[in-house]
């Protein structure tokens, strides 16, 4: 009985609190980066042409600072009327230019495209849309949730959701895929193939693949039930292009995947994550979540919106843990 109570307390406290946030703390599928010139933080979010939030600190105060594509994307998809309904921004800096990958899609279908926009400063009014990157259509995958990475001098885009989960494709340039064929990097064969929002980064000898497992908040009309909601998983590989395994050594193409962050305390359904190499703190995990209202006895998520969360990362036995 006491042992059980102890176990329960240990599990309930498994995750430290999220880092603080002041000012505008909205985030949905956030993409975050520090500007090279002045260290200013930019946080981009899904919806409304991709919103821009800026701050001089991870903690805030964060300010809303306009949108990336006020006129929406130039990509045309039959069935998608709202060209400003853009999702899941992923930003990196290369050769004096910021590249942002984004998604236009009909939710719950494979009628999707990944586009790219560029800017020299990331400020509102500075972005140029280049349209689709050109991932070939295929019923095997869904072209959403882009994430760029460079491995041994080659550029890759990770992407995918549901159906056969996560894929990777080599890029000819940061604007175009070229002739490469996407290959699968992670798959959960156990149930509904609910893996999305890949974010990969290098640390030491490994490439770490984080992703969101479960159901995103807005995917169904009712918010996902406890146990079905988003949580953040991690796998690792020496090559970065395949052979990802979890802490037990299980292949992440055969349902492997170790927990990095799940619902805890006031944080419900963390996901849509990324890792920023902070100039002061080192690697920091950032994500969105639903705040649970302490006064709400049913512990239902606060459906008024997604919030931004972050935690520094530490390494234990070669695996990242939140601090
Ligand atoms: C695979 O899916 C099952 C059922 O949805 C889930 O319980 C499990 O956590 C998932 N595993 C991974 C590694 O995502």
Image (cartoon, rainbow, N blue to C red):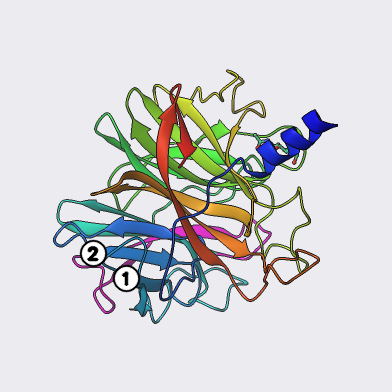
User: Outermost residue toward the right?
Assistant: 1
Indicate the quadrant of ligand 1 in the picture: top right
- Please state if 126 lies on the left or on the right of 236 as rendered: left
Disc assigned to residue 84 = none
Residue 196 is situated, as x and y percent measured from the top left of the image, at 58, 47
Which quadrant of the structure image shows residue 268?
bottom right
Q: Residues within 10 Å of mark 2 (few under 14, many from 20)?
A: some
Residue 278 is situated, as x and y percent measured from the top left of the image, at 29, 49
Say which residue appears at 35% left-offset and 72% top-offset. 61
- Please state if 34 lies on the left or on the right of 259 as rendered: left
Residue 221 is situated, as x and y percent measured from the top left of the image, at 76, 69
Q: Which residue is mark 1?
A: 54
Which quadrant of the structure image shows residue 156?
top left
Q: Which type of secondary structure does the marked residue at label 2 adopt?
A: loop
CB contact under 8 Å: marks 1 and 2: yes
User: Outermost residue toward the front?
Assistant: 2
Q: Which type of secondary structure does the marked residue at label 1 adopt?
A: strand
Asked if residue 236 is positioned above or below residue 93 in the image, the reply reads: above
Residue 221 visible in the shown view = yes
User: Outermost residue toward the top?
Assistant: 249
Nearer-N-terminus badge (1/2): 2
Residue 247 is situated, as x and y percent measured from the top left of the image, at 56, 23
Q: Is residue 55 magenta?
A: no
Disc assigned to residue 40 = 2
Asked if residue 121 is positioned above or below residue 147 in the image, the reply reads: below
Image quadrant where one finds the C terminus: top left
Say which residue appears at 58% left-offset and 60% top-offset. 289
Q: Residues within 10 Å of mark 1 (few under 14, many from 20)?
A: many
Q: Which residues are magenta?
A: 105-131
Say which residue appears at 64% left-offset and 54% top-offset. 265
Residue 146 visible in the shown view = no
């Amino acid at each position: 009985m006491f042992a059980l109570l102890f176990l329960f307390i240990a599990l309930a406290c498994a995750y430290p609190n999220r880092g603080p946030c002041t000012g505008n703390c909205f985030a949905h599928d956030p993409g975050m980066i520090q500007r090279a010139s002045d260290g200013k933080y930019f946080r981009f979010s899904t919806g409304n042409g991709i919103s821009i939030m800026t701050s001089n600190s991870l903690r805030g105060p964060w300010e809303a600072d306009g949108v990336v594509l006020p006129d929406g994307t130039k990509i045309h998809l039959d069935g998608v009327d709202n060209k400003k309904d853009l999702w899941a921004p992923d930003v990196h800096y290369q050769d004096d230019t910021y590249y942002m990958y984004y998604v236009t899609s009909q939710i719950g279908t494979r009628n999707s495209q990944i586009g790219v926009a560029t800017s020299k400063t990331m400020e509102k009014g500075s972005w140029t849309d280049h349209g689709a990157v050109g991932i070939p259509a295929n019923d095997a995958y869904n072209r959403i949730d882009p994430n760029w990475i460079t491995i041994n001098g080659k550029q890759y885009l990770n992407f995918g959701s549901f159906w056969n989960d996560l894929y990777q494709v080599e890029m000819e340039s940061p604007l175009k895929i070229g002739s490469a064929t996407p290959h699968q990097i992670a798959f959960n064969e156990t149930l509904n193939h609910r893996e999305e929002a890949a974010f990969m980064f290098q640390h030491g000898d490994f490439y770490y693949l984080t992703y969101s497992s479960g159901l995103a908040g807005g995917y169904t009309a009712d918010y996902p039930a406890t146990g079905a909601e988003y949580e953040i998983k991690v796998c690792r590989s020496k090559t970065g292009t395949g052979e990802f395994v979890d802490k037990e050594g299980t292949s992440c193409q055969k349902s492997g995947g170790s927990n990095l962050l799940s619902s805890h305390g006031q944080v419900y359904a963390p996901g849509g994550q990324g890792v920023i190499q902070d100039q002061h703190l080192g690697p920091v995990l950032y994500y969105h979540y639903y705040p649970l209202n302490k006064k709400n006895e049913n512990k239902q998520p606060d459906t008024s919106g997604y919030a931004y969360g972050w935690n520094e990362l530490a390494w234990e036995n070669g695996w990242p843990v939140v601090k």
